[in-house]
Amino acid sequence: MLNDVTNIVVEALPQFQGYVYPNEAALHPVWSTLIVVYPYITGLVAGAFIMASLVRVFNVKALEPVYRLSMLTAFAFLLCAPLPLLFHLGHPERCYEIMMTPHLTSPMAVFGFVYAWYLMAVLLLELWFDFRQDFVKWSKVTSGFQGILYRALTLGVTDVSEPSVRLDTKMEWVLSIVGIPSAFLLHGYVGFIFGSIKANPWWGNVLMPIMFILSAIVSGIALCVFNYIVLTWIRRKTVDMRCLDTMAMFLFYALVVDAVVEGLDVLHRGYAAEEGFAVLQTMIREKLFYTLNIGQVGIGTLLPLLLLGSLQVLRRRVPEAVRRTMIFWSGAMILIGVLAMRWNVVMGGQFFSKSLRGVMSYKMEFAGQEGWLISAIIMCLPFIILTVLVKLFLSERLQPNGHSSQSSSAT
Amino acid sequence: MGAAFLGLVTLSAARAAKAAVQTVFVSTSAPKGYDPTRHKWLMCIDDNKCIGCGLCAEACKKENGVPEGPYYRTWIERYIIPKPKPGSDQTRGEAIVDSPNGGMHGFPQPTLPKEQIEHAFFVPKLCNLCENPPCVQACPVGATFRAPDGAVLIDPKYCIGCAFCVQACPYGSRFLNPVTHTAEKCTLCYHRITRGLKPACVEVCPAEARIFGDLENLHADDPLQKFYEKNRVQVLKQYLGTKPRVLYAGLDEEVR
């Protein structure tokens, strides 16, 4: 009798179709919305930084107005990047073990070091060298808390003579050059966390780090476009169209490369049609239908490609206001599409059984550790931090000086 | 020569240091004085013998205090291979696999009528004790490790509960314990085998489908020795290069 009852209980919860290993039949996947948000945020950091590097390393003058905004965006998001990882741990109080006793064969163990390197050695330093002479200037013209803050941020280096400023610029250039491979490393490594799982045919793929890097660049530029337009709109200023067009151009080309590589991945899987192909087909047709076909491919790739592509061809003939709107919506759609891509990778890899005989269902929770509320809060946090940073360091009252006088028609 | 000697001394010193560190920091359920270097544990499954009674899964849950619900350190799968549909060019129908409650309370009657079934069989599953364990490779803090005797173990006081190992295990052998929030899986009943007992599942198996032993200390009429002599064996998902130390005899191609 007891057997019958327990069997009925299991049958009453049809969380899966086909056969899944008993340990996979738990209520929700072990990695949930938090782990979707984690590569999304990290990708935005890497992308925003690479976009800023276009100014310093490749000397794309047209992008000067968004240089500081991109750097601050990267910084704000980087501060929040480890939060989803931390909250998803079963024992967050033991998180320091990753740094204290890292197990070096684990891709996850290296995160602490890559993160620390990127935050300390690349972003903070570059930001400091860029802002230092402004800190000196601002500390003289402001009082109260802000004055103290700017004075503290000069770290006592108040020399703004010509050679000293030249050194700042040179250091920025060096740090940007170091920063580009670091940004690739940061996000390529996040891709490797998934790509290295050979047990999972959806993840275990050499192209995974490359797809992550490319989609990161795309999403980072899209975020900068989004932030720039929103900031100018809030400040009731006009957008520098030369800058926006250049961003749109880079966004378009990055999206083309990203779409080609992701298409190549799909093509290869379809052609090779290995052991798990049937179950992967079910995923694309059923489990990930909306997020993959509509979210990632339709909204995130095809529509922006169409909009941005037509702008490349017809740039001169499209009125500024229309162009601005088209670029804004392309950026917004790409941001949604890349989030959908992260969802498809992270959740997609857990919607089917490693027995390749069945698929699981998932009902997203609202509250709790695996709920989407906490993920939404973590997603909002960088924007709040960015608002504070913009208020402090891109304030309209404080005109930047010297080599960075460009610093945005947004200010 | 001198350099080689020096190297050897350094190496042995490093090994001694590592062993000392492990004794202090790594907790296993082995008794004091147990020397893992003197054993080589091996689990074999004679799949022709399994009757799917589920006693092993039940004994495992009780012995190891595995929580209620879909959490199993060992489980039984039932494979039903139907005859091919008339007129189809296939040699056999698509396998129907199930494992209700991990097979712990046996299996219900198959939904397919008897005359449509080509053949059916049971497969006990557990941690595959890989020699190249992907879970150990993936653990970011080294909380899961492979002991010199071949057992892949987890230190629950050290595990941070990131579940990376759960993702990395190709066999679905790991889960996050909902009470302790740490990773868990079959340990071969390490607390028992290190005291000269058999794992609980082997102890209760009425069909002697599970054969367990110590390759380092085999005697002539050891069941493991006999099993080895009599059978050709294979492992699960061999193409992944994990080199499992759970060997199956009489496995069907459908089993993954």
Image (cartoon, coloured by chain):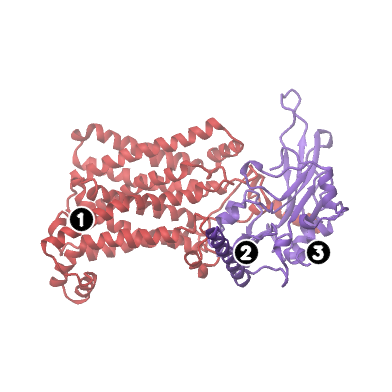
Residue A377 is left or right of residue B251, and the answer is left
Which amino acid does the dot numbered 3 rest on? Leu
Name the secondary structure under disc 1.
helix
The chain holding disc 2 is B
Q: Residue furthest right?
A: B221
Name the secondary structure under disc 2.
loop
How many marks overall? Answer: 3
Do the residues at discs 3 and 1 belong to one chain?
no
Q: Which color is chain B depicted in?
A: purple
Q: CA distance from mark 2 to mark 3?
A: 28 Å
Which amino acid does the dot numbered 2 rest on? Pro
Q: Which color is chain A depicted in?
A: red
Q: Are marks 2 and 3 in contact (CB under 8 Å)?
A: no
Do the residues at discs 2 and 1 belong to one chain?
no
Q: Residue furthest bottom?
A: A144
Residue nearest the observer in this picture, B172 or A58 = A58
Q: Which labelled disc corresponds to residue A170? A: 1
Where on the picture, by quarter, is residue A60?
top left
Where on the picture, by quarter, is residue A375?
bottom left
The residue that appears at 55% across and 48% down in the rendered structure is A197
Residue B34 drawn above or below residue A223: below
Which amino acid does the dot numbered 1 rest on? Lys
The residue that appears at 31% across and 47% down in the rendered structure is A221
Residue underneath mark 3: B197
The residue that appears at 83% across and 59% down in the rendered structure is B203
Q: Which labelled disc corresponds to residue B178? A: 2
Where does the image place residue A114, in percent across and percent down from the top left? 41, 58
Where does the image place residue B10, in percent across and percent down from the top left? 55, 64
The chain holding disc 1 is A
Q: Quadrant of the N terminus of chain A?
A: bottom right
Q: CA distance from mark 2 to mark 1?
A: 54 Å
